[in-house]
Amino acid sequence: MTPSTVTSSGATPGQSTEAAGFATASAASAGTSWSPAIRIADPALKERIAERIAEVTEPLIALSTSLHDDPELGWQEHRSSASVAEVLAAHGFAVERPYLGFETALRARIGTGDFTVGFLAEYDALPGLGHACGHNLIAAMSVGGAIGLAAVADELGLTVEVIGTPAEEGGGGKIELLDRGAFTELDFALMAHPAPVDVAEARPFAVAHWHVEYTGRAAHAAAYPERGINANDAFLIAQTAIGLLRQQLPPSVRVHGVMTNGGEAPNAIPEKTEGRWYVRAETTEELLAVEQRVIDCFEAGALASGARLTITPESRRYAEMRTDEVALEAYRANASALGRSFDVDPAEATMNRASTDMGNVSQVVDAIHPYIGVGGTASNHQAAFADACVGPLADKALVDGATALAWTAADVAAARGTSQPTTTAGPNPPTR
């Protein structure tokens, strides 16, 4: 189903929070902020979820390690998606792979309930860096959370899905899946992402990904320079213009990229240069407003050098995140009950600004995308962070993340689904 828009209180417009399935705490006085208290799932069910995840910890760690040791790039994750599918099938899920025509996408389902929860699994790696964004852990946490939640699916009236989503790293796999009808049957979607520290709320930038190419004319750089059109000069002019533009851009805008081909030989005027460039902004609306100004900088390079410019989108735009705030509060409570802490140095917590195609999913499905810390001093997209995504601390993050996600899904199902074994206290999962 396609859910209604969720307001900050968790109710649909015109609906009371109680009608939406949540109890609320009144403000002590006018102007005092309050937090909604979710009607949580029966703690006994949560214990069963945790016990089930504990039972499958060994295959979950093995899955994470195998993905980490055999990284595959976006749209090429054949072995990775097969490994995810194999673990899910071994634990009773019916698996579709390929899914919706994508060779490395999958959907796994278990249960027959009316309320459908979808755990999203990513497993693509970074060029030259392997799993330096920890997608091996994302996949294992989602698989583990789904297996744990499946143990109580009947009691909560659930259908549990895992959707394997290729090519998050710039390929927009979830957007392509959305275009073919994925996610629309979900009532709630969730995943967790590794980071240096725990951060509950994702606040990703909207982003456009471009392949930029200049085509000039080759010539001998010493003998016949006047016969050449220097495609490298075009890029230099464009990058200088972008650098100067930054002073006039809003502080929420980011423009960055790399040249992937700068020419062939120092004594030949470069005929072709290429690069990959990203433009990010706080919202899709802001992104659309600034894109043309950056394109103008690339066009300036073409005009001044005489080279021909071609800009090709590498994917559809990634959107900002529309977070289900009440479900996120439940996640905070559940993760805290497991000993996770959100009292962190703000300077270490900025991974939650990284763009993700989960933002596009959240525009049509109620969703959360928290971050879970793996410790250490490295940050995402560093080689040392890939190292941090295996080992004892990473394994603990895997189990904690799977458990917190599954507990949160149980809370949401208990509050919004049709079968509701609940307790009406505030978020108070079993402490472990």
Image (cartoon, grey):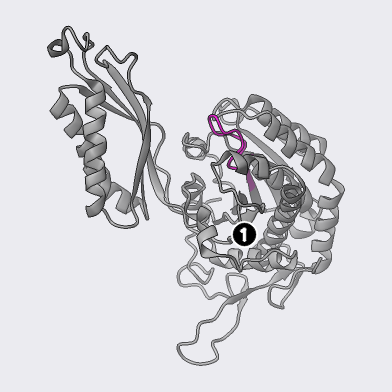
Q: State the residue lying farthest toward the bottom.
A: 29
Tell whether 198 sits left or right of 339: left
* Residue at (55, 65) in percent of width and height: 345
* Residue at (59, 56) in percent of width and height: 370
The amino acid beneath tag 1 is Asp
**Residue 329, how many percent across, how many down?**
60, 68
* Residue at (68, 25) in percent of width and height: 79
* Residue at (30, 15) in percent of width and height: 266
**Residue 251, how many percent across, how many down?**
32, 57
Question: For the residue labelled by badge 1, is the local secondary structure a helix, a strand or a loop?
Answer: loop
User: Foreground: 280 or 166?
Assistant: 280
- Quarter in which the C terminus is drawn: bottom right
Compared with 199, 384 (above or below) is: above
**Residue 377, how many percent across, how many down?**
61, 52
Q: Which residues are magenta?
A: 119-135
User: Foreground: 387 or 399?
Assistant: 387
Number of labels in the image equals 1
- Disc 1 crowd, CA 10 A, few/some/many (<14, 14-19, 20+): many
**Residue 321, how many percent across, how many down?**
47, 54
Tell whether 256 sits left or right of 392: left
Verify whether residue 129 appears in magenta. yes
Secondary structure mostly seen in magenta is: loop
| Res. 314 in view | yes
| Res. 278 in view | no
Q: Which residue is mark 1?
A: 198
